Image (tube, helix red, strand yellow):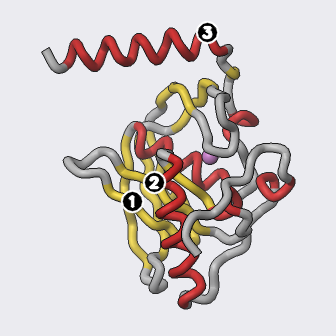
């Protein structure tokens, strides 16, 4: 196994509901390992089962809030708490080149199982909260462009990316 192909918008799998994971076996572990590799190679922030053609409730989110990035594996995830609101730019590995403005909660708490079936809870804020919501939406067959307030045109995307860069260089001064 190894790298899996990332399915792009237009493939009906992306609009289907994923089924719950009930077997915490070697196949699940292999799927999660492959998804991890695929996510890193694609330089994304998250990846969900349907994006690699597997209609199971599994997803990965890269939590960037700590000192070191951490890939969080979520099996059968559910958002159990959400508060606040944020409005920001969002994209998806299955919709290359498409960016939209999406409202999400500022903080979420997710309950999920790990690859061995153990339940845990995980909180996310800001970008990580956004990624949790986005990936869990994939498991319901929801793509971000259908919940976006608006899709940005390429010039806007470029401008916003520049502004972000400027803000970052300002911070480091
Ligand atoms: Ni996505």
Disc sitting over residue 62 in the figure: none
In the depicted structure, whether residue 85 falls above or below residue 71: above
Give the mark nearer the N terminus: 1 vs 2.
2
Asked whether the beta carbons under mark 2 and mark 3 sit within 8 Å of each other, the answer is no
Which residue sits at x=73%, y=53%? 7
In-image side of 52 versus 71 (left or right): right
**Closer to the observer: label 1 or label 2?**
2
**Residue closer to the observer: 105 or 154:** 154
Residue 69 percent coordinates (x, y): 30, 51
Residue 74 percent coordinates (x, y): 49, 67
User: Is disc 1 placed on a helix, strand or loop?
Assistant: strand
In the depicted structure, whether residue 7 falls above or below residue 88: below
Residue 167 percent coordinates (x, y): 30, 14
Which residue sits at x=61%, y=40%? 92
Question: Could you classify mark 1 by the number of other residues whose Cα lies within 10 Å: few (under 14), some (14-19), or many (20 or more)?
Answer: some
Asked whether the beta carbons under mark 1 and mark 3 sit within 8 Å of each other, the answer is no
Q: Which residue is mark 2?
A: 40
Q: What distance separates the C-alpha of mark 1 from that of mark 2?
A: 9 Å
Residue 137 percent coordinates (x, y): 65, 51
Q: Which residue is mark 1?
A: 71
Asked whether the beta carbons under mark 1 and mark 2 sit within 8 Å of each other, the answer is yes
Q: What distance separates the C-alpha of mark 1 from that of mark 3?
A: 32 Å
Question: Could you classify mark 3 by the number of other residues whose Cα lies within 10 Å: few (under 14), some (14-19), or many (20 or more)?
Answer: few
Q: What distance separates the C-alpha of mark 2 from that of mark 3?
A: 27 Å
Q: Total number of numbered labels?
A: 3
User: Is disc 3 placed on a helix, strand or loop?
Assistant: helix
Give the mark nearer the N terminus: 2 vs 3.
2
In-image side of 21 versus 39 (left or right): right
**Residue closer to the observer: 46 or 80:** 46
Quadrant placement of the C terminus: top left
Which residue sits at x=42%, y=38%? 127
Disc sitting over residue 155 in the figure: 3
């Amino acid at each position: 196994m190894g790298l899996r192909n990332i399915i792009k918008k237009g493939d009906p799998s992306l609009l289907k509901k994923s089924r719950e994971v009930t077997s915490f076996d070697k196949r699940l572990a292999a799927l999660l390992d492959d998804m991890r590799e695929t996510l890193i190679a694609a330089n994304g922030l998250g990846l969900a089962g349907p994006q690699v053609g597997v209609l199971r409730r599994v997803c990965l989110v890269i939590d960037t809030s700590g000192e070191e990035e951490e890939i969080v594996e979520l099996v059968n995830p559910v958002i159990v708490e959400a508060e606040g609101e944020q409005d920001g730019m969002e994209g998806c590995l299955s919709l290359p080149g498409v960016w939209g403005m999406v409202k999400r909660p500022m903080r979420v708490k997710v309950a999920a199982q790990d690859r061995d079936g153990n339940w845990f809870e995980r909180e996310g804020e800001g970008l990580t909260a956004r990624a949790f919501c986005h990936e869990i939406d994939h498991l319901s067959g929801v793509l971000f462009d259908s919940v976006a307030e608006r899709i940005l045109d390429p010039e806007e995307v470029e401008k916003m990316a520049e502004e972000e860069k400027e803000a970052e260089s300002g911070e480091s001064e």
